[in-house]
Image (cartoon, coloured by chain):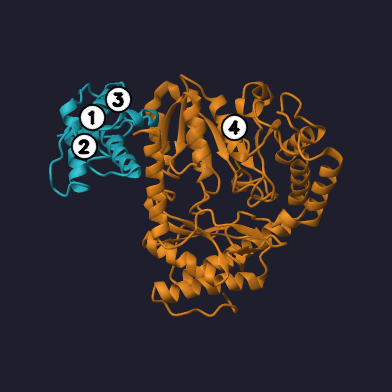
Chain colours: A orange, B cyan
Amino acid sequence: MSLLEKLEAAQRSQDVLQALGVNAIGATIDVAGSATEGDIAGNRVVLAGTNNYLGLTFDPVCVEAAVRAVRSHGTGTTGSRLANGTYACHAALETELADFLEARSAIVFTTGYVANVGVISTLAGPGDVIVLDADSHASIYEGAKLSGAEVYRFRHNDPDDLDKRLRRLGERASRTLVIVEGLYSMLGDVSPLKQICEVKDRYGAYLLLDDAHSFGTMGATGRGLAQAEGVEDQVDFVTGTFSKSLGSVGGYCASRKHDINPLRAQIRAYMFTASSTPSVIASTRAALHLIGRRPELRTRLWGNAKRVHSALAGLGFTLGADASPVIATIMDSPQQAADAWQMLLDAGVYVNLVVPPGAPKNMSILRCSLSAAHTPDQISQIINAYAVVAEHLMGRPKAVAGGSL
Amino acid sequence: MIPTKLRDSGDTGRFLRPIVMTTYNECVAQIQQILRTTVAKGEVVGEDMDLIDELGLASLDVMELIEQLEDVFDISFPINELGDVRTISDLARRVQLLTDR
């Protein structure tokens, strides 16, 4: 296939989406002064597909911190971390992250994607092995590919299959990096981390946990899934992002077991890209400070998630997993999912439409992500919008929101 | 067609496993058998057929096919090598090598 034939093929697959009659991919959202409302195609909607789990993007403390930083340190660092792009604020955030996670060291990256690609491709190399969960994020696959290591997938959330893969590796299991996520972003299901740790320990393999969606949302103080499961000391490396619970953009890697500082001069994605803008670092630090001090944010988030989850189950939707901040409803076909997505938008609710090949196992899903900032009324609006879908597309009676819903 | 010993993916360590070479033909036959129940609807598919262009498998289907082969032959297939696999024959040759390790 020539270069330009590839473009044509890509256009054809976009045409398939267009034919579904919606403009779900890359819909333009103008956020309207709050973490939970925005304008799409001229209509004010409740945002329920933004990963803004703790709703901190408009928190006055975070906003003020960013404003102060941009005034005193300017709009950008114009340099990479290893050259002129490390300010005191970058180093301070790394210390604060390490303290929060009780880690030996932490490294901050410009995005979460870059953190995964950089760390994974550097930790493992030719002669090493990576065994990753099949439903891993694109950045994990990308880092694995770039590493030059031999890469195997194990069946999603299946510790027995991981066990088989490590057994087949024999002695090479001790040169193996196992990679899983905490909360999986598409279906909202959670890794069986305790069993994964048990298996990798039995074979002497290393574990990297991508906690992008569970940092801030899980664990007694928001340290993520490993804290919730009581296995923080067994996880070798944790990566994560600032663009979910912390409401900005950026990524990190931290470790309790190993000093990862020497990796700084090895990770190309750290050395050869511009560092985060000081205002981004400032709001991230403010948000990190709040996560530890406002456990009520997590309580509200999970309350909202459970309320929506039980209402959607009551409406007869097939759900991707138990209640979590990500609630996926599995639809019958791409067309039905697209129709439902548009119906939700018309009812004033924005969620994410995910159709093959973007979703696991060729599923077509509507992905709703909840926020601590959603008000009880907004949660009712979300539930009512899904009730319209249930009634029109699935032939279910319309449920009444409110009350126990 | 698959030697019974190879179907047992229990705790028999690799060195204890009886030395039974899986032949290329056995690999082809196994792939054909899996595809017969999925894409080919009873038809036998030729070993030179392209999995994606001719048999119409999506990349996820190829991964599922490989997962089944991994279970049957008790192997792990490196995903770095997926790019080199176009036909049933390519896949069978690779699977045969992996069973040899």
Q: Which residue lies under the disc numbered 1?
A: B92
Between residues A2 and A35, which one lies in front from this camera angle? A2
The disc label shown at residue B31, or none = 2
- At mark 1, the secondary structure is helix
Q: What quarter of the picture does the N terminus of chain A occupy? A: top left
Crowding near pointer 1: few (<14 within 10 Å), some, many (20+)?
many
Marks 1 and 2 close (CB-CB < 8 Å): yes
Marks 3 and 4 close (CB-CB < 8 Å): no
Q: Which residue lies under the disc numbered 4?
A: A236
Q: Residue furthest top?
A: A127
Q: Nearer the viewer, mark 3 or mark 4?
A: 3
- At mark 3, the secondary structure is helix
Horizontal arrangement in the rendering, residue A65 relative to residue A400 (left or right): right
Between residues A370 and B49, which one lies in front from this camera angle? B49
- Marks 4/2: CA distance? 38 Å
- Marks 3/4: CA distance? 30 Å
- Residue A257 % position (x, y): 64, 29
Q: Residue furthest front?
A: A4
Horizontal arrangement in the rendering, residue A136 relative to residue A101 (left or right): left
Identify which residue is drawn at 27% across, 28% down. Answer: B95
- Residue A139 % position (x, y): 53, 38
Q: Which residue lies under the disc numbered 3?
A: B98
